[in-house]
Image (cartoon, rainbow, N blue to C red):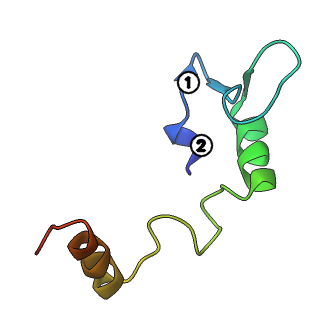
Amino acid sequence: MNVNELMNMDNMYYVGNLVDVDGNGWVTKAEAQAILDELGMGDDNSGGYGDESPAEYKRMLATVGIKI
């Protein structure tokens, strides 16, 4: 997950749906990135969603009945 995918407003990013926060779930961009990194959801983590090879992606689509 990229920090820019989080709900944001006026340079504040909402992480209340990711972590239990005491009070306000809005944090700065740097704090949001640190939280994503701590949760293992930052962009630099491999092995997550979206890291599939083209062959693996085709196999996954075929599993749900989509042929390309």
Give the left or right position of residue 26, taking residue 9 as reference. right
Q: Amino acid at mark 2?
A: Val
Q: Is residue 14 above or below residue 41?
A: above
Where residue 51 appears, x then y in whole percent?
Answer: 47, 73
Is residue 19 placed above or below 41 in the rendered structure?
Answer: above
Q: Is 64 drawn above or below residue 60 in the view shown?
A: above
What amino acid is labelled 1 in the image? Asn
Residue 41's quadrant in the figure?
A: bottom right
Which x, y percent locates residue 39?
76, 52
Of helix, strand and loop, which one carries label 1? Answer: strand
On the rendered structure, is 68 left or right of 51? Answer: left
Query: Furthest-top residue in view?
Result: 23
> Would you name the residue on which mark 1 appears?
8
Give the image location of residue 12, x and y in percent.
65, 22
Foreground pick, 32 / 63: 63
Q: Does residue 16 appear left or right of residue 38 in this picture?
A: left
**Upstream in sequence: badge 1 or badge 2:** 2
Residue carrying label 2: 3
Q: Percent position (x, y) of residue 2?
A: 55, 49
Q: Within 10 angstroms of label 1, few (less than 14), some, or many (20 or more) residues?
A: some
Q: Is residue 55 above or below residue 51?
A: below
Residue 61 tag number: none
The reply to whether callout 1 and callout 2 are in contact (CB within 8 Å) is no
Helix, strand or loop at label 2? It is helix
Q: Residue furthest right?
A: 22
State how far apart marks 1 and 2 are (Cα). 9 Å
